[in-house]
Image (cartoon, rainbow, N blue to C red):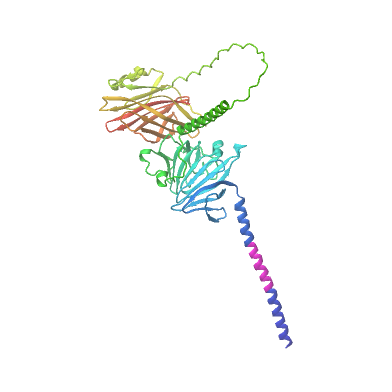
Amino acid sequence: MLQRHVLHFAFHYVSKLTSHYVSRWLMAAACIFACGGTLAADAASSAEVAGTVALAIGEATLQDASGAVHAAARGDAVRVGQTLLTGPNGHIHVRMVDGAFVSVRPQSRFRIEEYRYDPALPSNNRVKFVLEQGVARSITGRAGEAAREHYRLNTPLAAIGIRGTDFVVQASADVTRVLVQSGAVAMSPLGTDCLASASGPCNTAATRVLSAAMRNAYLELGSHSSVPLLVPASRALNSPNLIAPPQAEEPAVVSKADSANLVSRDAQRDSNVKLALKNASEDHPPAAVVQEPIATAPALPTLPVLEKPAAPAAPSQFWWGRYVAFDTAYVPTGKESLARDVLLATLAPSARETVVGNDMFALLQPVGNFSMPKSGSFDFKLAESEAYIVRDDRTRVSAATISSPVLNINFGASTYATSLMVNGSGIAPLSVQSTGTIGSSGRLNATSKSVDKFDGILSTDSSQAAYIFQQGLKDGFVAGATRWVR
């Protein structure tokens, strides 16, 4: 009997003890989970604010670095580390802290990996985005403008750097496409010489530059491609803007002309304000104040302003001539004409050599050894050009004009990218675009081009460049020659 009471007491004590510790353990566990959630929320809220949601429609959510997801709403803070997610009908617009703009279009995943804006010390600025899939538009703000070397947008395949830019990107595991609406971008395949973990643009042999002058063209990099390829506007069937069109609420594309108009309107506004103040002062003149006359020294004679003479233009290192077959139709003043069989005798003395030619032009340069800088990227300026439209079996030739010229030479990567527009009577504006590599002799080797024929070369000292182009028409062709200076 005594033994039974002892056992009952022991069991009751142990049960109470166990219940006590189990309760305390459950309370501790609950505290851990609650505190952990609070810490995660605190960590998310303490992440650096990168911008504010300006528009969110359809399926639009924000995912924190911790994995927590909540619906995006106008006015929400967008923080570093967050991913912007959109469904089939979703759009998210974000106004960044430096005035930049980001649009995430439907079916997209866009992550803000880094965003730092330091107006006092621009070298501290950092911008890094990752478009995992879908389509996004980026308009550079003050952080990127002041420190372009610290701006990067990654996709699964490519790294994209900027030169003061409004651009649209489409990305997937298989392809990346980029369209430039203002400024220019540099696109490089990710690899051992262009790491996804790095910041800023890459500068490799596979880097390609695209500018807004190449209207509606885009660069395309496939998963099995070693370099981005230029897709001209005439074949731009998979443009990012066609795959995921912009919302009406997105900012309009601002061209250089539009920017000039904005400046003009601001100047007019300031002028109107000054005029209003002047009229107000005339309507209510201040009381007259009588002062004693002040003796003044005689005025000094005005000396003429001596203008500094303009620096002389660098002498041309290229020459071209048209073949004599075209002279019966059109002979421009001051231009040489030459027959193919007397080309060297007429235009090419022993100090010059013919380098390239097409059906209308022959391009020559001085004989010499080619040398090229090992680094640096330069935007060359068009110094001279000539273009013609040839029709009716070469019996009718008319002059054409060249506009929107762009030529970038990347000496470090040994690459070039160029574009221009040809306008003339009876033809639609012709876009001439080409990207490629620079050979050991200075030749421009086109890896992509929008015209039938494209041939060019750098001068022996790499300070100038020249190229000729030709594009067929139904009843003739368009041909042109250009010279550029650094």
* Rendered residue at 29%/27% (across/down): 390
Viewer-nearest residue: 320 or 23: 23
Q: Is residue 313 above or below residue 148?
A: above
Q: Specify whether 53 is left or right of 364.
A: right
Q: Specify whether 90 is left or right of 235.
A: right
To which quarter of the image does residue 287 belong? top right
Viewer-nearest residue: 417 or 124: 124
The picture places residue 162, in percent across and down from the top left corner, at 50, 38
Residue that extends furthest to the bottom in the rendered view of this protein: 1
Q: Is residue 207 above or below residue 78?
A: above
The picture places residue 230, in percent across and down from the top left corner, at 41, 38
* Rendered residue at 59%/53% (across/down): 44
The picture places residue 273, in percent across and down from the top left corner, at 54, 30
Q: Quadrant of the N terminus?
A: bottom right
Viewer-nearest residue: 82 or 282: 282
The picture places residue 462, in percent across and down from the top left corner, at 47, 26
Is residue 423 visible to us here?
Answer: yes
Residue bounds of the magenta highlight: 19-32
Main secondary structure type of the part rendered in magenta:
helix
Residue that extends furthest to the right in the rendered view of this protein: 2
Q: Specify whether 104 is left or right of 302.
A: left
Is residue 31 covered in magenta? Answer: yes
Is residue 154 visible to us here?
Answer: no
To which quarter of the image does residue 393 belong? top left
Viewer-nearest residue: 321 or 476: 476
To which quarter of the image does residue 340 belong? top left
Is residue 193 covered in magenta? Answer: no
